[in-house]
Image (spheres, helix red, strand yellow):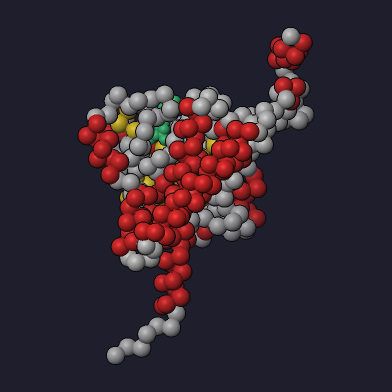
Amino acid sequence: MTSPDPGAAPVAAARNTAALDRYRMMRRIRSFEERVGEMFLRGESAGSMLHLSIGEEGVVGVTDAMVEGDSFTTHHRGHGVFLARGADPARMLAEIGGREIGYCRGKGGSMHIADRELGHLGANAIVGGGIPHVVGAGLSYRNHGTGQVSVAFFGDGAMQQGVLYEAMNMAALWRLPVVFCCINNQYGMGTRIDRASASVDFAARAGAFGLAGASADGADVEAVHAAAQDIFAGARAGRPGFIEVSAYRFHGHARMDKSPYRTAEEEAEGRRRDPVANARARLEAEGLADADALDRLDAEAAAEMDRALDAAVQATMPPLPSMFEDVYAPETPTPEPLRRRLARILNA
Ligand SMILES: Cc1ncc(C[n+]2csc(CCOP(=O)(O)OP(=O)(O)O)c2C)c(N)n1
Ligand SMILES: [Mg+2]
């Protein structure tokens, strides 16, 4: 008989706690995005271009492989990633609502949120736009030997953008601590991925550039996390990597899109691949949490996001004269035509 490994029990306990924490984070993201939808319906959001990440919560397996000090950029569907990296939901909702207490004083909104303290180098509405930034960050980390990793989160639409391949080549050539994470939700607006790309083996494509490549089922957060751990271990040691997280976008591209290009059957099938429901079922099946405890956890997440939405809705808008503050670099003079138009508005 082999004697039990004395280290095995604490390791298993830590893994179980982490799995529960990942579930909690996914549930918080789901609840947060539901409040974003509500905010839009109540007319409290700044604009209608709100891209919900419901169905993509499995990306928590990737964000959980990051550590404090790591940085990242996101695409236009980045709320979930930022929350998972420690964002305050009230300040995020305030930003989405154009309020002054928001992360960018209400001037960035859903698609241009950033926060250097939490390593968020910026969300970007240009498909592929946030990708090269992580190469710059990675070069700095490598040169200064900081041990940090920079991660670009983007959609499958960016797999068809040339900027990705320039960035991948440079990261591989210079052995930068960088990870490229493609959240493949099968669609770029109304175009299904197989109508946009002849080959959908994205990990193989990354391999051709000399990156470590992995593809994980985003409906299974633990599988995503296991794959991400390997990719991040390599990146921290100077071997940049790529990870695809497959998912299904539960709702339309943005709040106004009712997805007429998808059949009801396809949507029903896609929503069955629910990363949050799957994680919950697994925690129960493995005896790590019972239904009552999980119900309580779900209710806590919902209550937290209700409070965040109340705080955001009650917060004030930035004053009009601050319109150009934090928009241009401090030494840049406000362009004259804009200054004249602003003066007209203020005098009206
Ligand atoms: C360079 C560029 N081309 C086109 C657009 C218009 N556009 C906005 S979102 C989007 C689809 C992006 O799809 P994907 O990258 O898969 O992200 P998802 O919306 O699915 O999360 C497009 C084409 C854009 N913003 N930038
Ligand atoms: Mg997509």
Residue closest to the far left: 265
The single residue placed furthest to the bottom in the displayed view is 1
User: Which quadrant of the figure contains the N terminus?
Assistant: bottom left
The vertical placement of 112 against 337, above or below, is below
| Residue at horizontal 26 percent and vertical 38 percent from the top | 268
Rendered location of residue 287, percent (x, y): 34, 66
Give the camera-side residue of 194 and 119: 119
The answer to whether any part of residue 131 appears in the image is: no
At x 63% / y 42%, what residue is drawn?
115
User: In the depicted view, which residue is nearer to us: 169 or 342?
Assistant: 342
Residue 167 horizontal/vertical position (percent): 49, 41
| Viewport quadrant of the C terminus | top right
Q: In which quarter of the image is residue 106?
A: top right
Q: In which quarter of the image is residue 145?
A: bottom right
Position of 307 relative to 149 (above/below): above
Q: In which quarter of the image is ligand 2?
A: top left
Closer to the camera in the image, 229 or 91: 91
- How many numbered marks, from 0 up? 0
306 on left or right of 162: right
Q: Residue shown at 55%/27% (left/top)? A: 44
Q: Residue at point 75% right, 14% down?
A: 346
Residue 343 position in % (x across, y down): 76, 13
Q: Where is residue 108 in the image (x, y as percent from the top left)?
A: 60, 31
Question: Is residue 101 at all visible to an observer of this figure?
Answer: yes
324 left or right of 259 in image: right
